[in-house]
Image: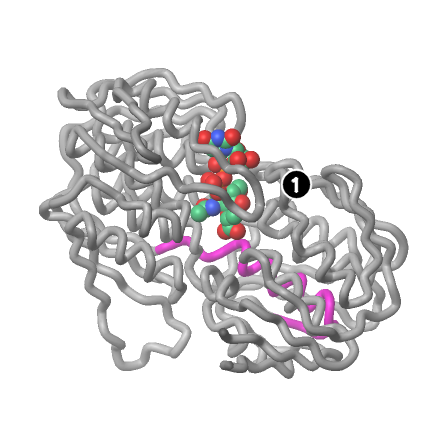
């Protein structure tokens, strides 16, 4: 199992190209099931989750073709993926596939909307929380689907097709919003979604669906209206840049010192996180290529942050911020409100010398002068990258184990950091 070896203490300087967003790519690929025609996605990141979803879509009959390299393409250019669901040959998503990646449960929406039936394995447990799918099921029921739970599978039927309706989410849910929007796009009549998620990935999916002929308005606001259409067509769409990858590298250079230009980043997609970095005395400035982030000499100021749905501070940057605050001046507090078990990184950061006290959903971090390298264990995608960030600033060597978590959501992380001066390498064992 691969590990990553890091020797800390070197500032980061240079340019890092930001990849397409994992959390937009996955629902966009799933949206290809809504049409018989070809959906072309540009700026697709090279991630384990993307490969896994290709397998899952292939099982339903989707042909996936990747364009080859073109002359002049730089090595970090995103991929172009052609997805064709001309014929859906199987409306079952088996446990063996779904259990490997939760987001694949979302195929239930386009399958029941287009085929009138879907049989999808429940995703099962997750390291960061219970993560039920009750609100996704509620949304489909509001659109007229008959739902049955059978042997660990959710069976959804709508023999006469879905029909528009009112969906009011009791809490903000990204997956619930994706499922509601995709299903409503082919439902007869109008659907109104209240308390919808406003994440940029929801906006990106709605933009792509509208290029396919859907009639969606209000994406990015709490109230989304979808006028159902009978059929959707093919389209070409470029995946939005990854705001979580952007925020991660911004926190890395804040941790190590130095200056980075994050190429292709869109600062407005993570303004809350950039505001927090500003409060922590980190220099952040938009540029015509993306974002410049620097910290030269000045220490890191402690902050108080609570994670919230967009446009609040993203839970997917909580662990990275905690790593940064472990070397801040004074006491920081970070409250996690989205997932009930998203502090798996705390004890690993403590192994590196951080002083963190947990009390329910709040972590109190007493800043220390310097962390010290040690062997640590990755537990989930974002927790693992917080250990990498901490190790980049720690004294001596750190070995990060179980890095397969990282490959799920960060494209060529070691390359991108090494080209900016980090001593980091993958060790295969
Ligand atoms: C998406 O997960 C992202 N995943 C997560 O990123 C991200 O942390 C999360 O949104 C919040 O921003 C992808 O896009 C693939 P939710 P999702 O539905 O959609 C509860 C990463 O690191 N809930 O907004 O599953 C749920 O348990 C991942 O890239 C219900 O109770 O999140 C959670 O507490 C991790 N019932 C809260 O709502 C439901 O039916 C928000 O979940 C659905 C959700």
Considering the numbered disc 1 on the image, is that residue within a helix, a strand or a loop? loop
Residue 357 as seen in the image, left or right of residue 349: right
Q: Number of numbered discs present?
A: 1
The residue at 77%/46% (across/down) is 363
> Does the rendering let one see residue 197?
no
Q: Is residue 126 above or below residue 47?
A: above
The residue at 26%/21% (across/down) is 145
Query: Residue 169: x, y in percent?
Result: 47, 23
Q: Is residue 40 above or below residue 115?
A: below
Q: Quadrant of residue 14?
A: bottom right
Q: Quadrant of residue 168?
A: top left
Q: Which residue was labeled with disc 1? A: 307
- The prevailing secondary structure element of the residues shown in magenta is helix
Query: Residue 300: x, y in percent?
Result: 81, 61
Packing grade of label 1 (10 A; few <14, some 14-19, many >=20) is some
Query: Residue 423: x, y in percent?
Result: 64, 83
Which residues are drawn in magenta?
239-260
Q: Nearer the viewer, residue 275 or 184?
A: 184
The residue at 75%/75% (across/down) is 373
């Amino acid at each position: 199992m691969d590990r990553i070896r890091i020797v800390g203490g070197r500032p980061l300087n240079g340019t890092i190209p930001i990849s397409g967003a994992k959390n937009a790519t996955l629902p966009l690929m799933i949206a290809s099931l809504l049409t018989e025609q070809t959906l072309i996605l540009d700026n697709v990141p090279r991630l384990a989750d993307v490969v896994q979803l290709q397998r899952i879509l292939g099982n339903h009959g989707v042909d996936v073709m990747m364009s080859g390299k073109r002359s002049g393409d730089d090595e970090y250019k995103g991929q172009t993926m052609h997805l064709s669901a001309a014929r859906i040959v199987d409306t079952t998503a088996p446990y063996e596939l779904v259990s490997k990646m939760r987001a694949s449960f979302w195929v239930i929406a386009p399958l029941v909307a287009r085929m009138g039936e879907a049989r999808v394995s429940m995703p099962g447990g997750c390291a960061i929380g219970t993560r039920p799918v009750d609100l996704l099921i509620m949304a489909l029921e509001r659109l007229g689907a008959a739902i049955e739970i059978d042997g660990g599978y959710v069976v959804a039927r709508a023999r006469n097709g879905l029909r528009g309706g009112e969906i009011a989410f009791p809490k903000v849910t990204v997956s619930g919003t994706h499922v509601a929007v995709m299903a409503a796009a082919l439902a007869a009549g109008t659907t109104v979604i209240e308390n919808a998620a406003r994440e940029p990935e929801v906006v990106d999916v709605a933009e792509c669906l509208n290029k396919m002929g859907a009639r969606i308005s209000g994406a990015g606001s709490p109230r989304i209206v979808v006028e159902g259409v009978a059929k959707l067509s093919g389209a070409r769409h470029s995946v939005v840049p990854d705001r979580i990858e952007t925020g991660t590298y911004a926190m890395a250079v804040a941790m190590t010192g130095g200056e980075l230009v994050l190429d292709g980043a869109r600062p407005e997609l993570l303004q809350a996180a950039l505001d927090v970095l500003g409060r922590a005395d980190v220099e952040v400035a938009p540029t015509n290529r993306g974002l410049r982030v620097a910290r030269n000499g000045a220490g890191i100021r402690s902050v108080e942050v609570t994670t919230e749905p967009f446009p609040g501070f993203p839970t997917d940057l909580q662990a990275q911020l905690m790593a940064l605050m472990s070397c801040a001046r004074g006491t920081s507090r970070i409250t996690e409100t989205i997932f009930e078990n998203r502090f798996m990184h705390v004890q690993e950061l403590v192994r590196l010398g951080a002083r963190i006290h947990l009390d329910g959903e709040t972590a109190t971090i007493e800043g220390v002068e310097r962390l010290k390298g040690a062997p640590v264990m990755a537990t989930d995608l974002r927790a693992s990258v917080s250990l990498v960030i901490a190790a980049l600033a720690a004294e001596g060597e750190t070995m990060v184990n179980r890095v397969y978590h990282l490959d799920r959501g960060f494209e060529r992380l070691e390359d991108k950091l090494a080209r900016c001066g980090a001593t980091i390498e993958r060790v295969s064992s």
